[in-house]
Image (cartoon, rainbow, N blue to C red):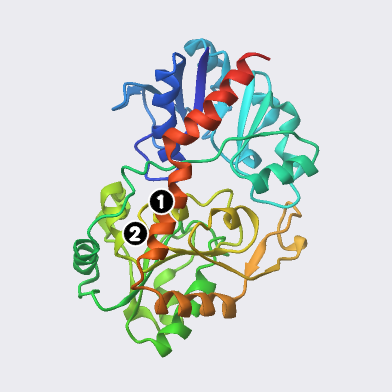
């Protein structure tokens, strides 16, 4: 069978782009045809990427609603796989074709606007998402996101800390390094930067050697002014952002792996996540995590701690669904504990061991390939 994979271009520095780059070559190598319909990262013409797979650009509509019928015909695709939040897709258009929804569920309950009844098959990225889908009346197949554990892996931590020190402008060898990797593209922030910055400020008052590394665009006008936020909490001199050239061109995976290795703990305390790929990458590199203790993130904690949360009232969000608000006091306690354990090897080994269960080859062979075969036998 031939598949049109609707996802970001493999040249994009995003988690879904990494998934596109990881899985499309494996689909092809399994004897199937695959072409990428790139809803972000490409305009102007088709290209063949470094894996030898054709990528088609969007036209006027960013999510390919206008060119989807033409692309399906042009590529002679038998089915469409979408790698994007279902909430932004028009099911009346995608549902005209055999449609596999790779559903990153990030809300409880699932909004009716998702039009999942139009899908021929639903792949859930998490077990938690599967439960939300089932509650809404939809059966799904568990096909998690994955990590390339050969790319994200433990390396010499002293060398990794040296690279981070060059980015920070000072040595981090004896510092307590907290790392987060999170897109800054909403205000109020789904990534809960305010909660993290407040918690770090409180910990830094006790541990002056604390440094927070934030791999995000601090000046994105669509997001939160992270520099101002750091100043407000009195930690501007403790927060390190990537250089502008890294934000503009995308931080290479090899350098991101160094940052994961240099960190003592990785944090992702979002209000909601459909998966939380950086948390998996960090643990593949051997770094323990502090994650939101609710929703999809809770099942990604192989080594580390979950943060206690309170429910956010449904009326705060347009779709009426509930998210989780991590308690700052809980974040502070988890950070204190991580600081006390930062020189131990065991937690880093456990992180790596857990992440290996979601290595891309394991996920493709154990989950995605059987899901494709089941779909093709329908």
Residue corresponding to mark 2: 260
Residue 8 in sight here: no
Per the image, label 2 sits on a secondary structure element best described as helix
Res 211 → quadrant: bottom left
Residue 224 place in picture, x, y as percent: 48, 66
In this rendering, position of residue 110 left or right of residue 352: right
Residue with the mark numbered 1: 281
User: Disc 2, disc 1: CB below 8 Å?
Assistant: yes
**Residue 99 position within the rendered picture, expressed as x and y whole percent measured from the top left:** 63, 23
Q: Secondary structure at mark 1?
A: helix
Residue 346, horizontal then vertical, whole percent: 39, 64
The answer to which image quadrant residue 91 occupies is top right
User: Which is nearer the N-term, disc 2 or disc 1?
Assistant: 2
Alpha-carbon distance for marks 2 and 1? 8 Å
Residue occupying the far front of the picture: 346
Q: Considering only vertical position in the picture, is 290 above or below 5? A: below
């Amino acid at each position: 069978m031939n598949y049109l994979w609707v996802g970001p271009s493999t040249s994009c520095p995003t988690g879904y782009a990494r998934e596109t780059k990881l899985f499309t070559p494996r689909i092809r190598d399994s004897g199937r045809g695959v072409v990428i319909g790139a809803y972000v990262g490409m305009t102007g013409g088709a290209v063949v990427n470094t894996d030898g797979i054709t990528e088609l650009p969007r036209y006027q509509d960013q999510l390919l609603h206008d060119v989807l019928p033409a692309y399906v015909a042009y590529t002679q695709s038998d089915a469409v796989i979408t790698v994007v939040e279902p909430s932004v897709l028009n099911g009346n258009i995608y549902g005209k074709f055999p449609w596999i929804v790779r559903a990153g569920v990030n809300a409880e309950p699932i909004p009716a606007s998702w039009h999942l009844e139009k899908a021929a098959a639903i792949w859930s990225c998490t077990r938690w998402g599967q439960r939300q889908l089932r509650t809404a009346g939809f059966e799904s197949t568990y096909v998690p996101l994955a990590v390339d554990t050969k790319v994200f892996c433990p390396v010499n931590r002293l060398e990794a800390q040296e690279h981070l020190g060059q980015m920070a402008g000072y040595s981090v060898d004896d510092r307590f390094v907290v790392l987060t990797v999170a897109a800054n593209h909403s205000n109020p922030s789904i990534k809960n930067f305010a909660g993290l910055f407040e918690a770090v400020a409180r910990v830094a008052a006790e541990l002056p050697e604390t440094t927070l590394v934030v791999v995000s665009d601090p000046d994105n006008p669509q997001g939160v002014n992270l520099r101002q936020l750091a100043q407000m909490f009195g930690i501007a001199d403790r927060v390190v952002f990537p250089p502008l050239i890294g934000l503009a061109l995308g931080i290479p995976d090899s350098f991101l792996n160094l940052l994961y290795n240099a960190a003592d703990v990785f944090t992702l305390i979002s209000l909601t996540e459909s998966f939380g790929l950086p948390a998996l990458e960090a643990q593949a590199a051997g770094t323990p995590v502090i994650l939101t203790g609710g929703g999809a993130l809770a099942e990604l904690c192989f080594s580390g701690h979950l943060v206690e949360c309170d429910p956010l009232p449904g009326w705060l969000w347009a779709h009426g669904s509930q998210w989780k608000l991590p308690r700052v006091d809980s974040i502070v306690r988890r950070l204190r504990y991580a600081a006390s354990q930062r020189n131990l090897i065991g937690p880093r080994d456990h992180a790596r061991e857990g992440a290996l269960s979601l290595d891309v080859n394991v996920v493709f062979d154990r989950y995605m390939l059987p899901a494709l075969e089941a779909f093709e036998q329908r």
